[in-house]
Image (cartoon, rainbow, N blue to C red):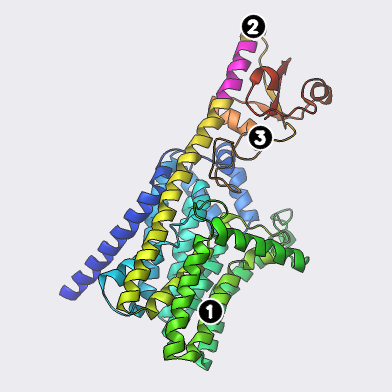
Amino acid sequence: MVELIKKYQGFANRYFINFIILIVTWGGMLRRSFNCDTLWHMVDLEGDIFTQIEDARYLCSLTDFLLSKLGVSTTDHTGITILVSLLILAAATCIIQSIFEEYLPNDSWYFKAGFYAITNLIFVNVLFAEPLMFCECALAFALAYFLGALSVYSFKKKRYVASFVIMLCAVCYYQTAAVFGLILVSGFIYFENGKIITKKVIIAEIIGGVCTMVPAMINMFSSNVLVWLGVIPELRKTPGVSGFGDKLNAIAGNFTAILRDGMTLLPFRWLTLLIYAIAILLICRNTVIRNKGQLVYSALLIAAVNIMIYIIPFMSAAVLCYPRLVFVFYTAMSITLLAALSEANDVLGKVFSVIIIGYVLIHMVRAQMIVSEHMLSNQLDILYANAVYHEILEYQGETGIIVENLAVVKDIDAPVHYEEVDYAVEQINERALGVVTATLMNIVTDGHFNRVDMDEAVYEEFFKDKDWKYFNPEEQLIIIGDTAYWVIF
C-alpha cells in the first residue's frame, strides 16, 4: 500500500510539474481567440464535421458531433477547450517520461531537471503554437498525441495488439500522431537494446513500424473506400510521390529553416543547430571512448528520426510543411537530447542540463510572445470588421437600404499576416481579414451578410491596380444598393 501511494504521489508530482510548464507557456491561449478555421467552424458546425470525415479524422468528427448533441461547442469558450487540451498534453508528457526515465544514468537532480526540460520540449516549442490556434481542433490534437504516447507505452510493455489499436484511434484524430509515435518507438528501441544494433533491434523496429505506420496507412486507404462508396465526393488531400527532386528541395528548405530560427519564430539564428551539435558531440565523445559500435546506431537513429519528420509531407501530392505537421522535429530533437544526456558524466550532465533548460526557456518566452501577438491579430480583425460595419450602418441610416451582400477582393499585395505582428508563419497568427472576411463580419457583428462575387465594373472603377498599406474604409469600401464592395489592404 505504501509503495502504491508513493507511486501515485510521484505521478501526481510529475503531472503537476508538466502542467505548470504547459500553462506558463501557453496560458495566454486561455483567452477567447480564433483563427480562420475556427470562424468557419462557428458558422457551419455540420459542414466542418463532414470536412473532418473527408480528411479521415473520424474520431475528431465524432467527438465534435457528440459534443454538439450535448450542447457543448469547442469554439464557444475556446479558453476552456485549450485548458482541457493542456491537461491532456500534460498526461501525454507523463507517459513519455515513464517510457524513458529508466534510461537516465542516475537520479541526480540536474539529470532529472534536464530530463524534464527535454521531454517538455516536445509540446513546449514555438511550432506547437499552430495546433493550439486551431481552437476547434486543439482537443483532437491533444487526444491524438496522448493516444500516440499511450500506444508507444503499450509497445514498451509488449502489448503490440493494444499498441496497434490505440494508434489506429490516434490517427483517426490526427494523422501526424503516427509519425510522433514512430519517432518515440525508435527512441525507445534504441535505449532498450543498449544502443547496439542486433537482430532483436531489427525485429523490434519492424514491429514498431507496423504498430505506428500501418494504422496510418489503413486510415489513408479508408478515404479511398469512402470515395468509392460515394460517402464523400473526392479526396480533399491526395497522396503522391511524383516530383521527387522538388519535394526534397522543399523539405531541405524547411528543415534548414527550423534549424536556423524555428521558421523565423526563435530569436537567435542557428541556436537549434548549435544545441544539436553539442548533443551529437557529447554522444560521439562517449561512444568513441566506450563502444564504437554504438556510434553507428546513434548516427542511424539521429538520421532516421529526422527523416521521419517529413513522411507525411513527402507522401502528399503537394509538400505542405505546416508547423502543425513538422513540430515533430522537436520530438526527434528530444530523442537526440535524451541520447546525449544518457551519455553524460556528472560534470557534463550538469552543464548539458543547464544548456537544455535555457533552450526550453527561450521557447517558452517566445511562445508567450507569439500568443500575445495572436491576440493582437484577433483584435485587429475585430477592429476592422467593426469599422466596416459602422460604415454600413451609417449608409443604411442615410438611405434606408439594408445591406445584405458583401463582395470582397484583395488589393495588389495583401499579406496573410498583419505588419504589426512580428511572430507569424503559415497559419500561426494568420489574419482572418482577406481569408474568411464575410465569415469574420458575420461572427463579429452577428450579421447575415451573403458572400457574393466582386462586380467587375465596380472593381475597374474603384479598386483596380490599388495597393494600400493601411486601413482606409473611405477608399476601400464602396456601397451600392444592397451590396458592400470591400477591397482588403
Residue for badge 3: 434
**Vertical position of residue 260 compared to residue 192: above or below:** above
Circle 1 packing at 10 Å, graded few (<14), some (14-19), many (20+), is many
Which of marks 2 and 1 precedes in the sequence? 1
| Quadrant the N terminus occupies | bottom left
| Quadrant the C terminus occupies | top right
Residue for badge 2: 398
Q: Position of residue 329 (x, y in %)?
A: 53, 64
CA–CA distance in space, label 1 to label 3: 44 Å
Q: Is residue 34 left or right of residue 220?
A: left
Residue for badge 1: 301
Q: Position of residue 222 (x, y in %)?
A: 65, 65
Q: Position of residue 140 (x, y in %)?
A: 49, 55
Whether residue 60 appears in this view of the structure is yes
| Residue 386 included in the magenta stretch of the image | yes
**Vertical position of residue 79 compared to residue 7: above or below:** above
Q: Nearer the viewer, residue 435 or 276?
A: 276
| Residue 421 included in the magenta stretch of the image | no
Which of marks 2 and 3 precedes in the sequence? 2
**Kind of residue indicated by mark 2:** Glu
Which of marks 3 and 1 precedes in the sequence? 1
Q: Nearer the viewer, residue 383 or 145?
A: 383
Which mark's residue is nearer the viewer, 3 or 2? 3
Q: Where is residue 55, by image quadrant?
A: bottom right
Which mark's residue is nearer the viewer, 1 or 3? 1
**Span highlighted in magenta in the image:** 385-395
Q: Is residue 287 left or right of residue 249?
A: left
Q: Position of residue 183 (x, y in %)?
A: 52, 72
Q: Nearer the viewer, residue 385 or 252?
A: 252
